[in-house]
Amino acid sequence: MASAKAVRAVEALSALAHEGRLSVFRLLVRAGPEGLAAGDIARKLDVLPNTLSANLTVLAGAGLVSSRRDGRSIIYKADYERMAGLLNFLIEDCCNGDASICAPVAATAARAACC
Amino acid sequence: MASAKAVRAVEALSALAHEGRLSVFRLLVRAGPEGLAAGDIARKLDVLPNTLSANLTVLAGAGLVSSRRDGRSIIYKADYERMAGLLNFLIEDCCNGDASICAPVAATAARAACC
DNA sequence: CTTATATTTCTATAATTCTGGAAATAAGGA
DNA sequence: TCCTTATTTCCAGAATTATAGAAATATAAG
């Protein structure tokens, strides 16, 4: 009976709940909107290309990254909207009207608003 | 080569990357600091007590919930600090100096600051 | 058209996680 | 003490996910 939103959230959380994939995702987040070629990612993180490909497929399936071909390379980039959606989902139910309850979460959110 | 922080993040993400556990966690987040007895959770979410117990153990292992005994019942509650820590970790690497990149994420954070 | 580079797909094995039944533990009440 | 309620632990089978080698596909360059 889980909502479609919850199912999507679990997909994204599952995709990130893996040391290799979390590293890839964070690298792409840091790399910015231009993204990185799969080969560059494999070299930087020292992973086998087929393993990386499988991990990128999972991240893409969860909508956390997108790709485009550039010559022989395939460039991957983080999807910031999707990441924001996931954070929003996790944050969403935390307040429930009582500001005092989720003070630490609000503080974190405020810190993030720096950029 | 993953940092201890990353390992802890993966633990929390893994714990939440499960439909049943995500439901439990969100229910506890909504329930507030008083928490809920395991039996109440089982009844509200209609899950077997042993399955719930296993799920609560995983969430507790990830530090996302804590428990205390009250008579025959065991009361579980969400750990807001830990949740904030996880959000912080996910948000942390998103900016990297360029405000324009993570605009959607910053917008989400601002929305969360409502409470 | 042949070769080199970049990445993915296929496939099988290994490892992990999920689920639910049954028994065990813990606490309170008769 | 005995019984009931509340929750956990133990366990085994089922299901899912991870890993890496080998082959396949796609593109570019000579």
Image (cartoon, coloured by chain):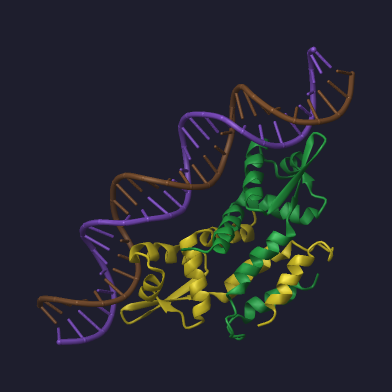
Chain colours: A yellow, B green, C brown, D purple
* Quadrant showing the C terminus of chain A: bottom right
**Which residue is at 73% across, 75% downward?**
A110
Please indicate whether residue A91 sits to the left or right of residue C12 in the image.
right
Residue B46, x across and y down, in percent: 70, 41
**Which residue is at 76% across, 70% downward?**
A106
Please indicate whether residue B6 sits to the left or right of residue B74 in the image.
left
Q: Is residue A72 visible?
A: yes
The image quadrant that residue B10 belongs to is bottom right
Look at the picture and state if A6 lies above or below B73: below
Residue A114, x across and y down, in percent: 69, 81
Look at the picture and state if B111 lies above or below D24: below
Residue A52, x across and y down, in percent: 39, 65
Look at the picture and state if B109 lies above or below C23: below
The image quadrant that residue B104 belongs to is bottom right
**Which residue is at 68% across, 76% downward?**
A112
Labels in figure, total: 0
The image quadrant that residue A80 belongs to is bottom right
Please indicate whether residue B99 sits to the left or right of residue D1 in the image.
left
**Which residue is at 52% across, 71% downward?**
A26
Please indicate whether residue A64 sits to the left or right of residue B22 in the image.
left
Q: Is residue A1 visible?
A: no
Residue A61, x across and y down, in percent: 48, 64
Q: Nearer the viewer, residue B16 or A57?
A: B16
Look at the picture and state if A6 lies above or below B49: below
